[in-house]
Amino acid sequence: MDHPRHNSFAFVLVGSSSSKHHSDGMRMPTVYIPHGGGPWPWVHVPFGTKQELGSLRSYLENLGAIVPEPPKAILVVSAHWEESRPTLMTHPHPPMLYDYYGFPEESYAIQWPAPGAPALAARVRELLELHGMPSADDAERGFDHGTFVPLKLAYPDPKIPVLQLSMVTGLDPSLHLSLGRALAPLRDEGVFIVASGMSYHNLRALHASAAPAADAFDTWLQATVLAEPTERDRKLAEWTKAPSARAVHPREEHLIPLMVAAGAAGADRAVLGFSGSVNQLKLSAYHFGSGTSPSR
């Protein structure tokens, strides 16, 4: 798809000698992924079996395999950041934000020094303005674990610029679908959009006895996300009507990033990128605009 208005956005992949632009019609996918709990890949955590966590780790380590070529930048919408309006992290060298507690001391020394993407932040603000969405900048915020955990696994050599975009307070699903639609042109500009959450997130029921609720919701979610895009978006906007919706998401901050990914997908269909579990509770990931699933 040709977007002549967007060609002014030139983002060079840090550490790459390639000058290839994405003007050849190569479109980046957009994904919704589970990031797990806290700093789980590097410390002992009191949930999940070795097999369950190993499967999730393998999936995330191979996430980069689904993109058609190395992205110029990665835009992340994490479940762990909400603001009154869409807000963009503009620090050129974002610090780490250890937004978890109760884990071993070494979990607060994890580093993942990816460069920030202030130029991309300006581009995102332009797109949001075109869609009537006021936005803001945050020059101090660092990478929260919804960003650095999955991306440290997927991209251990942190050379690609990364930008975090907040969700909007109130977590309205329709608003976040619209937010994703505003971001869609970035996919033709070499930007990999990653929505980071958990398809099951009820910390008070993180045990096998909650499996029937998790199964019911996961079955609905798969059927919904894999449906024709108009039907997909309609049902996602009404996700609280799903079986066991509030049993699985008492608060929906870990589901709402999916709305951004789906909105940015536009007419592109989804594939099931990952199907696993933690404590026998179903988890799933979805890839939009890509028929390739990484090994897991």
Image (cartoon, rainbow, N blue to C red):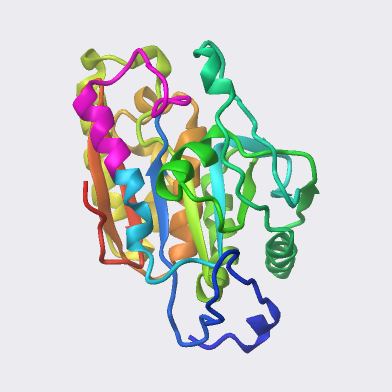
The reply to whether the magenta stretch includes residue 31 is: no
**Residue 255 appearing in the image:** yes
Q: Which x, y percent locates residue 9? A: 68, 76
Splitting the image into 4 quarters, where does residue 58 fall? top left
Splitting the image into 4 quarters, where does residue 228 fall? bottom left
At x 56%, y 56%, the residue is 159
Q: In the image, which residues are magenta?
A: 37-58
* In this picture, residue 186 sits left or right of residue 210: right
Q: Which x, y percent locates residue 226? A: 27, 57
**In the image, is residue 167 above or below residue 132?**
above
* In this picture, residue 221 sits left or right of residue 211: right
The one of 49 and 225 positioned closer to us in this rendering? 49
At x 44%, y 48%, the residue is 258
Q: Which x, y percent locates residue 238? A: 42, 45
* In this picture, residue 267 sits left or right of residue 226: right
**In the image, is residue 130 above or below residue 241?**
below
The one of 251 and 239 positioned closer to us in this rendering? 251
Q: Which x, y percent locates residue 52? A: 23, 29
The one of 262 and 189 positioned closer to us in this rendering? 189
**In the image, is residue 145 above or below residue 70?**
above
At x 23%, y 50%, the residue is 223
At x 34%, y 46%, the residue is 61
> How many badges with numbers are in the image?
0
